[in-house]
Amino acid sequence: MDFRDTPEEAAFRDEVRTWLSENLVGEFARIGGGRGTADEEHWDLRMEWERKLGGAGWIGLSWPTEYGGRGATFSEQAIFNEEYVKANAPGRITFFGEGLLGPTLVALGTEAQKQRFLPPILKAAELWCQGYSEPDAGSDLANVRTRAVLDGDEWVITGQKVWTTFAHHADWCFVITRTDFDAPAHQGISYILVPMRQPGVTYRPLRQMTGAGEFNEVFFDEARTPVDMVVGEVNGGWKTAMTTLGFERGTAFLSMQLAFEREWRNVADMARKNGAADDPVIRDRLAKAYAGVRIMAYNGMRMQTALAKTGKVGPEASIGKLYWSTWHRSLGELAMDILGPAGQIVPAAGGGEYVLDDLQRSYMFSRSETIYAGSSEIQKNIIGERVLGLPREPR
Amino acid sequence: MNFAFSEEQEELRRSVRRFLEDKSPVTEVRRLMETTEGYDPKVWAQMANELGLQSLHIPEAYGGQGFSFVELVVVLEEMGRALLCAPFFSTVCLAANAVLNAATEEQKQALLPGITSGETIATLAFTEPSGKWDANGITMEATPDGSGGYTLDGTKMFVLDGHVANLIVVAARAAGTGGTEGISFFTVPGDAAGLTRTALPTMDQTRKQAKLEFSGVKAELLGEAGAGWAALSKTLDQVAVCLAAEQVGGAQRCLDMSVEYAKVRIQFGRPIGSFQAIKHKCADMLLEVESSKSAAYYAGWAAAEDNDELPVVASLAKSYCSEAYFHAAAENIQIHGGIGFTWEHDAHLYFKRAKSSEILFGDPTYHRELLAQRIGI
């Protein structure tokens, strides 16, 4: 047990710091850290920054070198994330490609798929979105009804997806479709890569309770994609979908802890400024939130060590997702209690629009976090059944 | 960065677990908790002679093995899991650490070998009838006797194993001082003249406490006069880490009991663990138990390193692990239903230990206030 950098880790950290100090300047430095994976502010500038990151080899750090990655260790990836957040560098746009599809392709993709799709992710040349949820397939994801039917050497896809972040920016979507209509729910699903820019794909923004519209409804109306765009087996897509979800619930969020700790600091600063920090109940809640965000870091480090030893995320990753989403939601509630009456007023900077300040936005947006990527209730089922071995609900 | 125990540390865990399964099964826990002494001298000697537990983290210069708090955390976790009835916490976590933090070199040479060999049962007496865990709780006065010694007058309460200890480390203050000023440590033999020791009937029978009444008791100064608070404060941080580790072991056992039962108890024709109402309780417990481990282990490392983070992570771990253990122990009873409420079932032993551990050395609210101060709120 040792929480200090090894000499190799220290050297890597230096390299990251040096690059950031030389490149995170001017307009890039002014943008500041992101406000979650769905944030769209300063889009063009952030895309330019992503291409800069990609050019310097900082995207897909831990991917194998034969596909353009650096083959970095988990600890190097974690060091990069730490330094990135500490430097208050721009919020990342390439999450869905780098964090979700990329690792899924590395694990389960064909050689051709890896060659075709990994390099553009690394260069931020192609953006991805995630086609999972549907109006009738939320927690019960295996109930997807979007159909894919083979027509010669192309799949023809028809159906509706919902809560699709960045659909309006994405070049491609990884879509869970039904390809066998007679098989049991989990056995008739295929995971298919579909180009977004074609006549058969339309989308419509969904306005959220925050007032913003980062999520979309996506409609596939006989959209087409080549036959070799299935990741994993045809009708074996449930396994692929769960592999992606494992990354979404696990490693992809390891880097969020530092951003949360920064947010805790902002809340504590607000409490000091407006005097709320003199209230013993607020003090208790602030200390509890601090303990919570530090333990999130300790949990992450334990998971990272386990990953470095076994190379896999297991169902334990569900503890992480349940943990951080619950923690963040209660921080949002604490922030509003600290803001007091001032929290009732939407900033004038919105020019009459319903635009929230950062703490208000976090208070609202965190309600989505205990729902997306598997609701807290689903996480608890997974923990109960796969980690603790409790019997499944009769179905 | 490496957040895992080494193979040697895992082996230590296995051997302590085997030892406790053999020497401290729940039948023994139940037998000893009914006694006033609250421990088995034979097992205490075996702990010292066969496993060297009392000497584990004490430097080799004083007859110890020179391991760190990380190893101590492993051992305490197993003791918490087994509800070991022994004066280990008082002797090793409280007294030995107080001596290590406060004593002169000569005093360490004199006092610690007895602890490492298992001959000395020791404790730390600092809390008084006010039940305060901070410097203001110490009102007992130490009066210089004019020939280099001191006499102590007053009452110490909630002293772990105070009725069986043969070495008592006492915190008292100089007349006319207050707060963190003027506090010193003293040592008193358990059979000192003028010392009246009363075993207290404890709600948690697996952990014994005593009231110690001092009336002109001759005492020897431990370390430097008036400089005791820094050493006591550090001792209390270390003790918080130790207790957090014990709590982790107890909480894990409660979770294990709950999960085992939820798999086999049938109601409405199916195991109760298949109902989400029960499953989700278990999932919440797992999250808290795992998080407690992360906190306690990290705090153990900070204590081992004796770094600046220790005060913050000690209060952090104690406040979190206290609530996690209590929650696990309470849910364990709920999941067991009626049987969990009986004297016969072991759930109440953990429920009581969880509550006494939550209160000892400051409850979660107390430690969160300390934490708030320590992080500058």
Image (tube, rainbow, N blue to C red):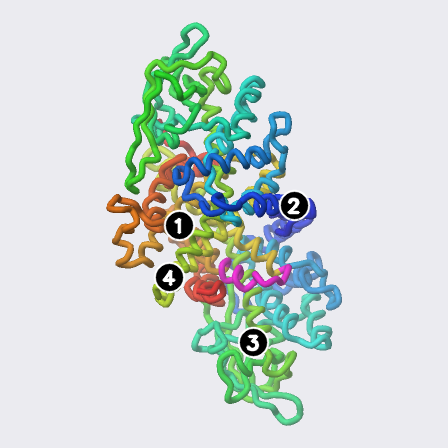
Residue B331 numbered mark, or none: 1
Mark 3 neighbour density, 10 Å: few (under 14) some (14–19) many (20 or more): many
- Name the kind of residue labelled 1 in the image: Glu
In the image, are marks 2 and 3 on the same chain?
no
Chain for mark 1?
A: B
Q: Secondary structure at mark 2?
A: helix
Q: Residue at x 67, y 46 (%)?
A: A11
Q: How many marks?
A: 4
- Relative placement, left or right, of A261 versus B85 is left
In the rendered structure, which segment of residues is drawn in magenta?
B304-317
- The residue lying toward the viewer, choosing from B354 and A269, is A269
Residue B12, percent from left and from top: 66, 51
Marks 2/1 in contact by CB < 8 Å: the verdict is no
Q: Residue furthest front?
A: A26
| Above or below B18: residue B242 | below
C-alpha span from label 4 to label 3: 31 Å
Asked if residue A103 can be seen in this view, the reply is no
- Name the kind of residue labelled 4 in the image: Ala
Q: Secondary structure at mark 3?
A: helix
Residue A271 numbered mark, or none: 4
- The residue lying toward the viewer, choosing from A208 and B253, is A208
Tell us which disc is closer to us: 2 or 1.
2
Residue A9 numbered mark, or none: 2
Q: Quadrant of residue B167?
A: bottom right
Chain for mark 4?
A: A
C-alpha span from label 4 to label 2: 36 Å
Is A90 included in the stretch rendered in magenta?
A: no
- The residue lying toward the viewer, choosing from A309 and B115, is A309
Chain for mark 2?
A: A
